[in-house]
Image (cartoon, rainbow, N blue to C red):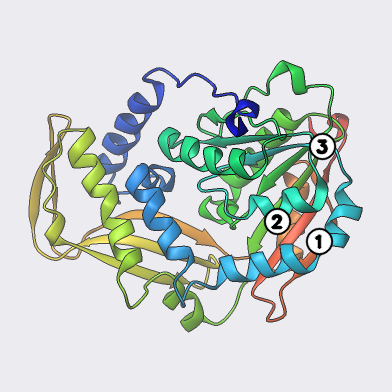
Amino acid sequence: MAAAAMLIEPAPDKTLDAQFRRDVLTGLSQPRKAIPARWFYDHRGSELFEEITALPEYYPTRAEVSILSQRCDELAEAIGRGRVVVEFGAGSATKTPLLIDCIAPAAYVPVDISGDFLRESCAVLAERYPNLPIHPVEADFSRPANIPSELKQHSRLGFFPGSTIGNMDPFAAVDLLRTMRATLGEDSLLLIGMDRIKARDTLVCAYDDTAGVTAEFNRNLAVRINRELDGTIAIEALRHRAIWNEQRARIEMHLEATRDIAFEVAGRRFTMQAGETIHTENSHKYDPRSAATLLYAGGWEPQCTWSDGDENFMVIVARAIGSELTA
C-alpha cells in the first residue's frame, strides 16, 4: 500500500491551543494591536492561502516554481542525493515534488502547525512516492523539532520555500534560522525562498487581490478567534488593508475597524475605534546582500543563489556554519 511509507507522528497536547490564546490576548492588549501571522493557518486559513498562491497578482509561487523547475540539475549538484528533507511550514507541500524529483531524498519530514492539513498533503505525497518514508510532525516550527531517530544517520536539508522567512522581523528571523540549524545539525544545508524588493504597486497588488481572497484570509484570523476563543468580534466591521512600508522594506497586513467596536475574547473585553487596526502580518523583502546578511547572522553561509527571469524572487542554498562560529 502507498501509505505504508508514511508514519504519522502523534498529535501534540493542548500546548498550541494555550499559546494561541496567550498570543491573541497579549496582542489585543497592546496599544498597537498585533497577532503573530502563524495563527492564520488553521485548516481554512491553509486552504485560503493555497488559493492565494494561484491568483494572478500573487507572483511569488509562480516565480519560485519556475526556479525549482528550471534549475533542477544545478540544485541536484549543489545539494546532492540521499539527504533527509525537513520542510518547515509544509502546508500543502505543492513545491515539494519538484525538490524530491531533483534530489531523491532518503526521507521526507514535513513540520507544520496545521495537523489536519498536514496529514492530507502527506497522504497525497505518499500516493505519489510510495517508497519514500514520510514522517509528518505537527508542531510549531519556530521551536526545535524532533527528527525521528532512525533518520539521524543521514545528512539533512532544510526546505523553507515561499518566503515565509519574510513574515518575521529580522531579530525573529535570525532566531528561527538558528533554531533550524539546531534542528538540522552539522553538515546540513538549507534551501530557502526569499521575495525580492520591487515596485510598490506590484507588491501591494500581490497582497490585496481583486478577488478578495487575501482579504478573506486575513479576516479568517478573526473568525478563528471567535470559534476557538469564544470571541464576539464583528467580522463585518473589519476591513483588510495591505500597506508597503518603505523604511522597513516590508508589506504589512492589517485588519482595520470600519467603526467603533467592542468585543470579548476568552472572557476579556476589548475595544477598537474606527480606523484602529490589528497588525496581522509582515512580509519583508530582500535584495541579495540583505538576504546573505540575514543568513550569516542565523548561522548559514550562502552557497548558491538563483532568481527567476523577472528577478522577482530568490532561491538560496546555504550551508550550516560550524558551531564554534554561531555560539
* Relative image position of residue 55 (x, y in whole percent): 44, 72
Mark closer to the chain start, 2 or 3: 3
Q: Nearer the viewer, mark 2 or mark 3?
A: 2
Q: Residue at x 37, y 62 (%)?
A: 253
Amino acid type shown at disc 2: Leu
Specify whether 282 is left or right of 287. left
Classify 10 Å Cα crowding around label 1: few (below 14), some (14-19), many (20 and above): some
Q: Quadrant of the C terminus?
A: top right
Q: Judging from the image, what secondary structure is the residue with disc 1 in?
A: helix
Residue 226 can be seen in this image: yes
Q: Residue at x 50, y 80 (%)?
A: 202
Q: CA distance from mark 2 to mark 1?
A: 8 Å
Q: Residue at x 15, y 39 (%)?
A: 231
Q: Is 134 located above or below residue 56 in the figure?
A: above
Q: Quadrant of the N terminus?
A: top right
Specify whether 242 is left or right of 220. right
Q: Give the quarter of the image for residue 125.
A: top right
* Relative image position of residue 82 (x, y in whole percent): 85, 37
Q: Judging from the image, what secondary structure is the residue with disc 3 in?
A: loop
Classify 10 Å Cα crowding around label 3: few (below 14), some (14-19), many (20 and above): many
Question: Toward the viewer: 202 or 256?
Answer: 202
Question: Toward the viewer: 220 or 300?
Answer: 220
Residue 35 can be seen in this image: no
Label 2 belongs to which residue?
Answer: 98
The disc placed on residue 72 is 1
Label 3 belongs to which residue?
Answer: 83
Q: CA distance from mark 1 to mark 3?
A: 16 Å
* Relative image position of residue 62 (x, y in whole percent): 59, 70
